[in-house]
Image (cartoon, grey):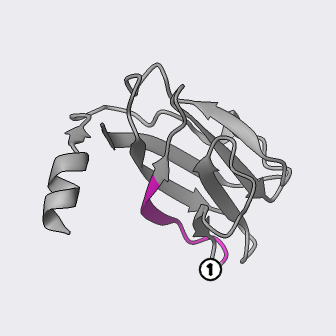
Amino acid sequence: MQNVIKKSSNFVDRGDPAAYDMLVGDFTTDATWRDIDLSAIVPKGAKAVLLRVKLNDDVAGSHLYLRQNGKVQIINAALIQQQVPNQTIDNDLIVPLDADAVIEYSGANLAFIAINLIVRGWWI
């Protein structure tokens, strides 16, 4: 297994960005799947992206799903979910990329307090 991972995956650390790539105002959270184009950050040919996502909402159960563009099932999507109202949660999520470095998201709450997303790196 280690040889397979070693030969097929090469993680590229993005470095030390000074700000988040997307903030709450960049998201439409109406439970519809929408695209996030990461091609300005992630090079063509990258296979997956490592994201840090911070989420805050005043309603427990509010959530944000992220998945590879073009997928249709939710069962394999990355998820970050508000467990306790008004408590910021954060998580590192790995999301596969399509050939154009696009992923999809779906958020279930019309008014999140915070959604902060940053690309930490990617696999080529």
Residue range highlighted in magenta = 85-94
Q: Is residue 13 magenta?
A: no
- Residue 116 placement, left or right of 25: left
Q: Position of residue 87 (x, y in %)?
A: 56, 72
Which residue, as the protein is rendered here, is positioned at the far top? 40
Q: Position of residue 107 (x, y in %)?
A: 74, 55
The residue located at (86%, 50%) in the rendering is 30
Q: Nearest the camera: 109 or 77?
A: 77
The residue located at (75%, 54%) in the rendering is 72
112 up-or-down from 14: above or below? below
- Amino acid marked by disc 1: Gln
- Location of mark 1 (residue): 83
Occupied quadrant, residue 86: bottom right
Assign the C terminus to one quadrant of the image.
top left
Circle 1 crowding by C-alpha within 10 Å: few under 14, some 14–19, many from 20: some
Q: Main secondary structure of the magenta part?
A: strand
Number of dots carrying numbers: 1
Q: Position of residue 114 (x, y in %)?
A: 61, 52
Q: Nearest the camera: 81 or 104?
A: 104
